[in-house]
Image (cartoon, rainbow, N blue to C red):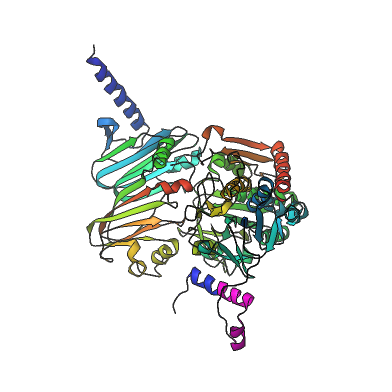
Amino acid sequence: MRRLVPVFLVGVLQGMLVLQLSSSRLPRGLAGPAGELSLTGDAILTRSVRAGERVVLAVRTTGLVDVTVYESTGDAAEVQLFREGGTPRTAKQFHSVQEVSYPLASLSGTEFLIRVQHRQPGTTSVFYRPGTQDEAMGRLRRGENLERNSGVVEAQDGLYTMPLYQLVPGTVVHLEVEAGTGTVALLKVREFLDVKQGRASLGSRCSPARCVGTGSGRERLELYVSDYDDLYLVAQGPVRFRYRVVATPEVLNYISSCT
Amino acid sequence: MQKLTRRQVLKVAGGTALTLAAGGTAGRLLGWAVAQEPSRPLLPGPTRRAVIVGGGIGGAMCARTLRKIAPDVEVVLVEQNPTYVSGPSHVDYVVGLEDAKKVTVGYEGLAREGVKVIRAAATGVRPAERRVVTAQGFVEYNVLLLATGLVPATHEIRQLLENHRMAPHAWTWAGTVELRRAVEAFRGGTFVITVPPPPYKCPPGPYEVACLVDEFWKKKGVRAEVVVLDANDRPQPPLLADLWRRVLADRGIVYKPSFKVVELDPGTRTLISDRGERQRFDLASVIPPQRAPLFIEEAGLGAPFVPVDPATFRSRAHEAVYAVGDVAAVPYTKSAFTAFLQGRNAAYSLARALGREPGEPDPVFNQCWPFVSSTEALLVEVAWTKDGRPIPERNRTGGPSRDHVRARKTWEYGLLRAAYG
């Protein structure tokens, strides 16, 4: 009888995961160990988050994926748009990633929809790391740093752009080139627009403190964010790079809850 | 030609202003300007002096509280304006709901209670010398409170500085008056109001303005489409997000989240986002991002805000410097009410720093009643522990109610009386 208990628990767990996948569009995934979902095709996943929860979504692929995270506001038309492949204005987009980690957090409880689309075939794992906003704040109060979001991006030829999320004063952005001959820069909005709209080249906006890769002569950087200005990741591929947005205890001066 | 940075431009402007005000004789004789700091003390050297820079609700409340709890402390308030117009009433004034006279106060009440009011614009702080610099001269302090508020960074939106009259906003008093004139003169079309990224003063304010002008024009029979372009991904503050979405939708107000305006095209009367999206307007109210005054950063007190201990408001960089309200890096909401309570609590810290034992004030909390129409308002309440930790179980929100309007008005008039006498 005792032997049957773990088998039963595994069965329950797998059943829950299958239920979660059943709400997905094109669900072609399998539940792996420790609650990890394994996908080989595109999928839309849903995840409910209770008030005060902070669940970290982690996606990793052997191919290349686009991940879009949308927090439902109860607007049925927006949910429908998302399910049909559209992108509501508030969705967070992570293009051409091999890995991405992003917290799903809510003050009042809500549902998140996550779309995973494969740019290059591969096996993709999706994992949710449970936690609460209080725990995250507690870590900062104990003087520890806290990763807020991160990813590994593979930018092909041409210009790649992505906004960085969750920047407040006291945040450190880590950027590191893993492979390739391209350049990656962290640009403020004016510089970003100049490059995006063709008024300036990436090289001309590539200051030493904010740039890695061939154009800069350095492979990694850490940028301390001391203001509320937005930053954009702008890459001229081919280049594979890793970024991490890390909160230091200093952010406690600026935020009242940690997402 | 080399591009000038914001700092360079402001330095040149500030230097010129200083020179003109202080007026180096040699410079004048030679016909050129030399930037120099005024060397004239405005008051004799201090013995037990607290200097407060900024006479908004936080600075005034600090001055008044300090006079009560430490009567032997010399309290000096440095403020450039002759009067203060209550911040929360800017939004009501836009549609004529509030009489400016009722919410404008002078500094006579504070002066009667023994606060020395110096009408001057602070242009610098020298923490090593414990000195505040103004165009007229300097004031020395034993302890300093910075309560300057934020300034609109209009230059951060391309072409807004040159065309600001096309898009007035209610986040300064002059802008509020201009916006009211524009709203009254509006004959129909598309009105667009923008919401900047945080932190900005009075988070619910832009949505209140949208609701109030929408109602105002509907009553007048003006056909207007009201559009809110929000740089944030949800209406602010986050606790009111769901209520705001419902209110805006009920009124037919178009809400576009994650639309960060970075440029105004005056030729086509269009606002452009960082994603390249465009929104045409007939009348706009563009609220720029907001920053602490530049002299604070230049004094080495912090950038963009002054990092302080949220319990004592003491600067983490200089022990004799304190900061409250919008200019302080604190986890409290940037609202009039928290600024008021921060000012009160900072007075206790200043008194303690000057050798007095005034007791312990209550922690900061926030109450706010944002208008959704001329007759109804929402409610939001948030509380923190003494050291600035939020207390989620004390969060409270309330839907549209007439009671909330009454509570708001009673609260606002009471706040002014309490801070200015």
Question: Residue at image x 56%, y 53%?
Answer: B323
In front here: B25 or B93? B25
Q: Quadrant of the N terminus of chain B?
A: bottom left
**Total numbered badges shown on the rendered structure:** 0
Q: Quadrant of residue A8?
A: top left
Q: Residue furthest top?
A: A1
Is residue B368 visible from the viewing direction of this image? Answer: yes
Residue A216 picture quarter: bottom left
x and y percentages locating residue A28 in the rendered image: 28, 35
| Vertical side of A179 occupied by B244: above or below | above
Residue A129, image x and y in percent? 34, 35
> For the stretch drawn in magenta, what is the main secondary structure?
helix
Where's residue B362, x and y in %?
A: 60, 38
Q: To which quarter of the image does residue B77 belong? A: bottom right
B16 inside magenta stretch: yes
User: Looking at the image, which is closer to me, B387 or A92?
Assistant: B387
Left or right, B386 with respect to A96, comes to right
Q: Looking at the image, can residue A158 be seen? A: no
What residue appears at the point 22 percent right and 15 percent down from the top-left corner? A3
Q: Which residues are magenta?
A: B13-33
Question: Looking at this rendering, what residue extends furthest in the bottom direction?
Answer: B30
- Residue B58 percent across, percent down from the top left: 63, 51
Which of these two is toward me, B28 or A192?
B28
Does B195 sit above or below residue B384?
below
The residue sitting at 62% across, 83% down in the picture is B25
Is B170 part of what is drawn in magenta?
no
